Image (cartoon, rainbow, N blue to C red):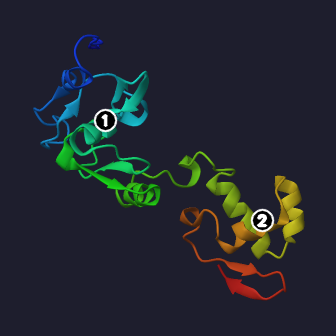
Amino acid sequence: MKKIRRIKKGTETERFWAHVTKEGSKLLSTQCWEWTGPFAGRGYGAFFMNKTYRAAHRTSWQLHNGDPGKLCVLHRCDNPPCIRPDHLFLGTFDDNNKDKAKKGRAPKGEGHKSTKFSDQAILEIRRRAAAGEPHRVIAADYGISQGYTSRVVRGHYRQSALRTRTFLRSDDGREETG
């Protein structure tokens, strides 16, 4: 593994550019300018500036266009180490989430950090509800609220795990498709 040298001399701009290669991405066959310095999580470059680490692509944006403020700096090329200014654009937090989802990088279902149950458990909750078991009983078995159980059954959570059509019993006893 290549040892990364920390450059301590020169201006912040000089130190920044010392960690960049403009040869293009060897993995993606793009004309990206790739960060070769330290990396933070998920493949994004990290640059030490003003006594703190900052994302290298945000630093690149700031050097070329000014401070992005609270806006996110997104990649057109979908290459996290890329810092090429014309491959970057600004967006809101919501824009960033939509961009991730569109590019297939947003964690879903069991892969999401907030997931409480496996896909199998979600299917079992729905199966039990479809069989007529009261939501309060299912909720007690799983240690969740009746309201949460109802939202799982109605498909408000984990729709990706539930692409099959099931018949659900609503709270008033009517059967409906879920």
Name the residue type under label 2. Thr
Residue at (89% x, 64% y) in the render:
137
Element on which disc 1 rests: helix
Neighbours of disc 1 within 10 Å: few (<14), some (14-19), many (20+): many
| Residue ID at (77%, 64%) | 148
Q: Position of residue 123 (x, y in %)?
A: 67, 63
Image quarter of residue 82 = top left
Amino acid type, label 1 = Thr
Q: Is residue 55 above or below residue 92?
A: above
Instruction: Estimate the x, y position of residue 132 in percent, counting from the top left.
Output: 83, 76
Q: Nearer the viewer, residue 21 or 134?
A: 21
Q: Is residue 17 above or below residue 168?
A: above
Quadrant placement of the C terminus: bottom right
Q: Residue at x 54, y 70 (%)?
A: 163
Location of mark 1 (residue): 59
Q: Nearer the viewer, residue 171 or 30?
A: 30
Which quarter of the picture shows residue 146?
bottom right
Q: Residues within 10 Å of mark 2 (few under 14, many from 20)?
A: many
Q: Judging from the image, what secondary structure is the residue with disc 2 in?
A: helix
Q: Residue furthest bottom?
A: 174
Q: Nearer the viewer, residue 66 or 118?
A: 66
Q: Earlier in the sequence, mark 2 or mark 1?
A: 1
Q: How many marks?
A: 2
Q: Is residue 177 above or below residue 42?
A: below
Q: In the rendering, at what x and y percent does residue 44 appear?
A: 35, 35
> Residue 39: where, in percent of width, then height?
36, 26
Residue corresponding to mark 2: 149
Locate residue 33 relative to residue 69 in the image: left or right.
left
How far apart are labels 2 and 1 at the CA level?
Answer: 45 Å
Tag shown at residue 115: none
Answer with left or right where residue 133 lies relative to residue 15. right
Image marks 2 and 1: residues in contact by CB distance under 8 Å: no
